[in-house]
Each structure stands twice: as C-alpha cells, then as structure tokens.
Image: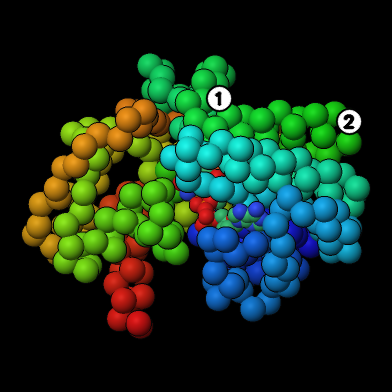
Amino acid sequence: MRALVTGGAGFIGSTLVDALVANGAQVSVVDDLSRGQRAQVAEAADFHQLDVVDERLVALVASIAPEVVFHEAAQIDVRRSVAEPVFDTRVNVLGTVNVLEACVRAGVRRVVFASSGGALYGDTDVLPTPETHPSRPASAYGAAKLAGEAYGSVFQQVGGLEFVALRYANVYGPRQDPHGEAGVVAIFAERLLRGEDAVINGDGEQTRDYVYVDDVVAANLRAAETPTLGAYNIGTGRTCDVNQLYALMAQTAGVDRPARHGPAKPGEQRVSCLDASLATDRLGWQPRVVLEEGLSRTVAWFAEQRRAQ
Ligand SMILES: NC(=O)c1ccc[n+]([C@@H]2O[C@H](COP(=O)([O-])OP(=O)(O)OC[C@H]3O[C@@H](n4cnc5c(N)ncnc54)[C@H](O)[C@@H]3O)[C@@H](O)[C@H]2O)c1
C-alpha cells in the first residue's frame, strides 16, 4: 500500500508510520514540524515539511498518489483552541478541508481522520459514550473535529472519497510530548523521573479513558483495510481518575512522592469514557494493552530517553 500520513512526525503519526513501514507500505509524511520531530520519522518514509493549509499540498499529494491518507496533523492544544479559536480553525478546519480537497483531486481511495471522542461529545451522562450520542463540543478544538467529520462526509458524497473518522479517547505512550498542555501521562512520567512535583489540577477526580498508542495505530490499520465507513470510538470503555493515574505511575516509576493539587482549570471536562463496541463489531478492533502495562512501557521509554541524553 502507498500511504500518506499527515502529522507523521508527531506522537501518534510517527508510531503509525513505523507500523506502516513494518507492514511493507510505501509511506510519505507531511508535517510542518510545529510540534513533531523529524528524527521520529522512520528513515524509510519520504518526508515533506509543509503546512497542511498550504496550497502546494494539492500538487504534492497528486505527485505522491497515495491510496490511503491518514490525517493526523492538527493543533492539539484544547486550551489554545479556546484562547486562539481563529488559529485553531485555520489548522484544524481549513487544514482538514485542504487535505480532503487534495485527496479528491489526487484520486485517493480513503481518508482515515484522527477525530476526538472526549472533545466531540463534551461532558455527558451516558458513560461509556456511544457514537450515537449528540455531539456537544465545548472548545474550538472539539468543534473543529466535528466540522472535520462533516466535511469528510461531504467529500465522500460529492468527491467519491471513502472517509472513516476514528474518535480517539486519551491516547498515551512513548513519544508523547511532555511539555504541552495535552498528555497528562507524558507530563507525569517526566516529572516523576526528574524527581519533581507533579501538579494535579483541582481535586483530581476528573476521569478519562486512556488508550495506548499501539492500539490506536492498530485501529488506523484496520480502518484503512476494512470496507466499512463512518465514525468509530477508539477507547477502552474503562475510566481512571487523575489521582489513580498518578498513584499507578508513581508505583511504576518506583517513586514515593505525593502529587501537589493546583487550582482546577476552568471549563475542564469532568468525565470521558468511550464505548468502542462498534469498532469491535465493524472494524474487528479492540484494545489489547491494559493500563498498567501501557503505563509501564511508557515510563520505561521516558526513563530510557533520559539515560540516552
Ligand atoms: N493524543 C491524544 O490523546 C489525542 C486524542 C484525540 C485525538 N487526537 C488527534 O490525533 C492526532 C495526532 O495527535 P498527537 O497526539 O500525535 O499530536 P502531536 O502534536 O504529537 O502530532 C501532531 C502533528 O501534526 C503536526 N502539525 C501541526 N500543525 C500542522 C500543520 N498546520 N501542518 C502540518 N503539520 C502540522 C505537528 O508538527 C505534529 O507532528 C491529532 O489530530 C489529534 O487531534 C489525539
């Protein structure tokens, strides 16, 4: 398969590139390196440094002529999306439309879009949340994911593109950036290994559904190959609150140090947990890596990075 991964220098994208290369695919990457790292991109992949909003994307995708495009590139900081909604919309809506347009013009068969379960549904009483639940995004980031799915469906009807949206839960694992606002697992791992205080926002009872990056990559591979279209939750159906998460990680890292509690972040979602039974039925996907195992792999990776520095 000839595949293109946008955002392929980032956390999930670069892990997906590795899996595609390992499966024998011919892989190209488009990433503007605003957050991703060139060194994370597998050597076997072609790399193109370009903003997904750039009009040159159309000619580039045509020259690559991929069969499948995995659209992972995005501005991923929810708080930044609230503070700078126009910037978020430029990258996450206009960028997605530009990718879809380029795909139609290049005759791409299928686009697999990185959507977001938590940000799309917003706070909900229905847990785990199924795909049929109304979408009530509470951030420009969530609204952009909803718009991306809507545009995908339009390009499917009008442009003949096959479109699959994967609504990820909270993804964690090696290569996640510990310096941004997203990625509490990466932030805790870094703090614990440095012997610094980790800060839990508010009471720490906010819950999330943590899904390991390799499982998310497996869902992308299934979504590229399985004839079914539509939107699928990619989560574990299990929740963990931030206090429990910190305790588990401290235990894994062998650190006996309590976290500090800081002020709650206004507007932060309280609960999020996804029902992924549709992905199991239609994509034949289910998560394989339990939280304890995933956290242990992640902490080990961050420890190895520190040793290598
Ligand atoms: N990590 C999660 O928990 C999570 C949850 C739900 C959805 N997602 C989605 O998954 C995708 C990948 O997220 P990630 O966690 O790997 O983030 P990431 O920041 O590590 O990866 C995003 C990549 O996109 C690139 N990028 C950003 N703006 C770009 C632009 N204008 N043009 C080209 N490249 C650009 C960045 O340089 C980076 O390499 C995103 O679409 C994100 O919204 C992630």
Which one is nearer the viewer's eye here, 22 or 134?
134
Question: Percent position (x, y) of residue 205?
Answer: 22, 32
Classed neighbour count for the residue bearing mark 2: other residues with Cα under 10 Å, few (<14), some (14–19), many (≥20): few
Residue type highlighted by circle 1: Glu
Task: Read off the residue under disc 2.
Answer: 158
Question: Percent position (x, y) of residue 98?
Answer: 78, 45
- Residue 272, image quadrant: top left
Dot 1: element: loop
228 on left or right of 272: right
64 on left or right of 86: right
Task: Read off the residue under disc 1.
Answer: 131
Instruction: Work out whether residue 274 can be spotted.
Output: yes
Q: Residue furthest bottom?
A: 308
Quarter of the picture containing the N terminus is bottom right
Which one is nearer the viewer's eye here, 192 or 226?
192
Quarter of the picture containing the C terminus is bottom left
Residue at left offset 72%, top offset 62%: 50
Q: Is residue 90 above or below residue 21?
A: above
- Residue 230, image quadrant: top right
Q: Is residue 9 above or below residue 74?
A: below
Residue type highlighted by circle 2: Val
Question: Percent position (x, y) of residue 123?
Answer: 41, 23
Instruction: Work out whether residue 112 can be spotted.
Output: no
Labels 1 and 2 touching (C-beta < 8 A): no
Q: Earlier in the sequence, mark 1 or mark 2?
A: 1
Task: Name the disc covering residue 233, or none.
Answer: none
Ligand 1 is within 8 Å of the C-beta of the residue at disc 2: no
Residue at left offset 47%, top offset 26%: 138
Residue at left offset 29%, top offset 72%: 303
